[in-house]
Amino acid sequence: MLVNDEMVKTIKESKAKGQTHVFKDFYNEIPSWQEFIDYIGEASHQESIFPNPLPDYDLKLDGKVFGNVLIKQSFYFYLGTHRHIGNSEKIVLSFQEKVNECFDLASLYINFSTKIDNVPAHSDPLDNFYWQCYGSVEWKANDKTYLVEPGDLVYIPARTFHAVNFSMPRAAIGFSADL
């Protein structure tokens, strides 16, 4: 069991306060880079989930859609997911069992270069969890900065403004739920 009672308690407390929380060393059995690369190839042939036209933010970053892959500034890939990658299904099932909510594998975030813009402050309508698989990133939320490293899990309550800064290639997997 990946998700335990103490973690659920922390998530509930964080949600009530609208606070971001990072679970250090949550799960280190991450997918390989090859699995991420293969998924990009597979997703490029799937039906897109992205709006047409793209939002101004994505267009400003030279966003282009190829199948179900949104590429920004040529090196940042955002993939809507149609299947699990690596151990992501194990994580989703563990959350569903402990929290009794429907968790969805939401997206993959991959960038191969640091010559791109960081993710500006924004909020999302659902509660989000981001499992950092490769690279270290800096999350900013609630006037705090969090260093997130491979194996860490970030919890962002719905409607919490947050930004992401990356200084190296990275890969992460996102999960969403309406808690």
Image: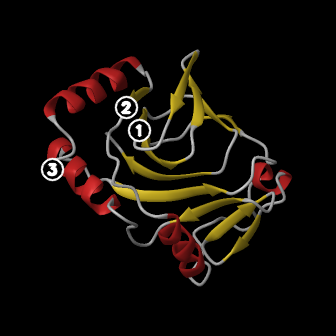
Residue identifier under label 2: 24
**The residue tagged with tag 3: helix, strand or loop?**
helix
Across and down, in percent, residue 61 comes to 82, 53
Task: Point out the tag, 1 or 2, that comes first from the N-terminus.
Answer: 2
Amino acid type at circle 1 is Asp
Compute the Cα span from label 1 to label 3: 20 Å
**For the residues carrying marks 3 and 2, which lies nearer the camera in this image?**
2
Write the residue at 62% across / 79% down.
44
Residue identifier under label 1: 152
Q: Can you tell which quarter of the image residue 140 is in?
A: top right
Seen from the viewer's position, the closer of residues 119 and 115 is 115
Across and down, in percent, residue 38 comes to 53, 76
Vertical order, 19 against 32 (above or below)? above
Q: Can you tell which quarter of the image residue 52 is in?
A: bottom right
Across and down, in percent, residue 177 comes to 36, 47
- Decide: few, some or many residues near mark 3? Use Cα within 10 Å; few <14, some 14-19, many ≥20: some
Write the residue at 70% across / 39% down.
167
**For the residues carrying marks 1 and 3, which lies nearer the camera in this image?**
1
Amino acid type at circle 3 is Glu
Amino acid type at circle 2 is Lys
Q: Quadrant of the C terminus?
A: top left
User: Is 12 displayed left or right of 140 in the figure?
Assistant: left
Are circles 1 and 2 on residues that touch, CB within 8 Å? Answer: yes
Task: Point out the tag, 1 or 3, that comes first from the N-terminus.
Answer: 3
Seen from the viewer's position, the closer of residues 54 and 146 is 146
Are circles 1 and 3 on residues that touch, CB within 8 Å? Answer: no
Seen from the viewer's position, the closer of residues 90 and 134 is 134
Residue identifier under label 3: 97
Vertical order, 93 against 12 (above or below)? below
- Decide: few, some or many residues near mark 1? Use Cα within 10 Å; few <14, some 14-19, many ≥20: many
